[in-house]
Image (spheres, helix red, strand yellow):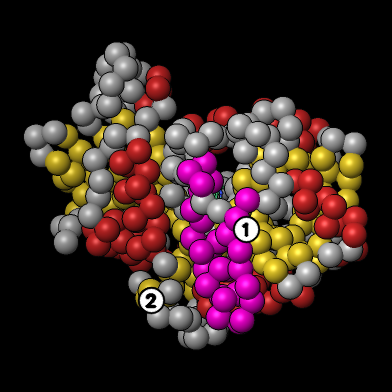
């Protein structure tokens, strides 16, 4: 259990107006959580302080070799006024898995969740309650040793910031257009793909710009070796419904094990669907689209929630999915998941936690 020191912001900011569109990741609350790590003291000095700049040496290792990781989860305001978190222990565990991969000391799961809860409670007034909005929580860890040699840092900062958000994609729940990337790859097995390290997102920028310029919102990544099998989308995992089979790429080491992905698999199984976690090639998807057996495609992610995919482009081939509208199962998953997150639908055990 952490003993978190609290220093309240002397002059709280104005809350966003009720009609503010809450463009993803642009507004930040009054406070942040910080905890330091040193070899002598381990993780220590947990504190909630006013949101603001974090002084770092220009030689801090994070600036040079990118030893950094982040997480993303959300807090929701339920109709009865409770503040709910969705499976926060899974974010804490995944953060620790990433820590292991990029040589950062782990944080006990209960301490991680406690830090999130205490910060959210202090900035609870910032949780928006319009449909489709929530308080996005961004925990991250950075390497802070002032040193230019390549080795793991011996000091770190764990920081959590909060941002009231609306939809991640400007399209909202309207289907997004996806670009199958054939030139660049995001990750390879043995690399960082299954870790939530900032480095993965840098690797994705070039293709994302290419896709945007061509009029597509996101990149669908293929495997780094054969450049054939679908992995995931820029900020979400991906699902296909071909006839009655639900397919999502197996976690093979280069895909982020999404918490929304896991929750969707669990819901679909609960509803009696066959869910296959397997390899699926872009060509299999395109032929299913052409033969009419591809019924739905959707992405899953904390920021993206459940996002229908309406169009897929690979090379010269473009296929439309379900006449460009939202599929029946996609809608059911969206309604159920957001219903659970907002406390309107009873959740399977342990899925929501009250702050
Ligand atoms: N894949 C990538 C690359 C992501 O950045 C995210 C977002 O966190 C996801 C998948 C979905 O993961 P989750 O459902 O845990 O948010
Ligand atoms: C999330 O969904 O929490 C993410 O981390 C996606 C992010 C890259 C915006």
Residue for point 79% across, 46% down: 283
Q: Is residue 66 above or below residue 195?
A: above
Q: Is mark 1 within 8 Å of ligand 1?
A: no
Secondary structure, mark 1, is strand
Magenta stretch holds residue 262:
yes
Residue 257 in the image: x percent, y percent?
49, 53
Q: In the rendered view, does 255 fall on the left or right side of 152?
A: right
Q: Name the residue under label 2.
A: 350
Vertical arrangement, residue 348 with respect to residue 223, above or below: below
Q: Is residue 18 magenta?
A: no
Quarter residue 241 falls in: bottom right
What numbered label is drawn on residue 248? 1
Q: Residues within 10 Å of mark 2 (few under 14, many from 20)?
A: few
Q: Report the mark closest to the observer, 1 or 2.
A: 1
Apparent side of residue 308 relative to residue 94 in the rendered image (left or right) = right
Estimate the x, y position of residue 76 in percent, counting from the top left.
50, 70
**Residues at marks 1 and 2 touching, judged by CB atoms closer than 8 Å:** no
Total marks drawn? 2
Q: Is residue 326 above or below residue 79?
A: above
Residue located at (55% from left, 30% from top): 202
Residue 7 seen from this side? no
Above-or-below relation of 274 to 175: below
Please state the horizontal and vertical placement of residue 83, each as a whole percent of the image: 43, 74
Which range of residues does the magenta coloring cover?
252-279
How far apart are labels 1 and 2 at the CA level? Answer: 24 Å
For the residue pair 181 and 126, the one nearer the viewer reads as 181
Q: What element carries label 2?
A: loop
Q: In which quarter of the image is residue 229?
A: top right
């Amino acid at each position: 259990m952490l003993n978190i020191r609290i220093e309240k912001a002397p002059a709280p900011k104005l809350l966003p107006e009720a009609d503010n569109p809450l463009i993803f990741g642009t507004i930040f609350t009054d406070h942040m959580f910080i905890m330091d790590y040193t070899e002598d003291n381990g993780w220590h000095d947990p504190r909630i302080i006013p949101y603001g700049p974090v002084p770092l040496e220009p030689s801090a290792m994070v600036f040079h070799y990118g030893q950094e990781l982040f997480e993303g989860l959300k807090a929701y305001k339920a109709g009865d006024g409770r503040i709910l978190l969705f499976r926060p222990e899974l974010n804490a565990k995944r953060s620790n898995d990433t820590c292991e991969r990029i040589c950062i000391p782990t944080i006990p799961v209960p301490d991680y969740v406690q830090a999130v809860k205490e910060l959210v409670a202090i900035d609870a007034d910032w949780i928006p309650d319009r449909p489709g909005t929530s308080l996005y929580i961004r925990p991250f860890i950075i390497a802070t040793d002032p040193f230019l040699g390549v080795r793991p840092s011996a000091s770190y900062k764990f920081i959590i910031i909060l941002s009231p958000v609306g939809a991640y994609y400007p399209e909202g729940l309207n289907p997004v257009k996806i670009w199958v990337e054939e030139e660049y790859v995001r990750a390879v097995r043995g690399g960082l793909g299954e870790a939530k390290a900032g480095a993965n997102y840098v690797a994705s920028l070039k293709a994302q710009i290419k896709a945007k310029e061509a009029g597509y919102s996101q990149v669908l990544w293929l495997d780094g070796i054969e450049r054939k099998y679908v992995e995931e989308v820029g900020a979400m995992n991906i699902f296909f419904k071909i006839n009655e089979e639900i397919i999502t790429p197996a976690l093979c080491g280069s895909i982020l094990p999404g918490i929304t992905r896991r929750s969707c698999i669990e819901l679909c199984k609960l509803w009696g669907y066959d869910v296959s976690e397997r390899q699926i090639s872009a060509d299999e998807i395109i032929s299913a689209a052409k033969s009419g057996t591809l019924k739905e495609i959707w992405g899953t992610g904390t920021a993206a929630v459940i996002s229908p995919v309406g169009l897929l482009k690979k090379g010269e081939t473009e296929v439309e999915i379900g006449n460009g509208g939202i599929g029946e199962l996609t809608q059911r998953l969206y309604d159920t998941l957001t219903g659970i997150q907002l406390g309107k639908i009873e959740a399977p055990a342990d899925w929501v936690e009250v702050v």
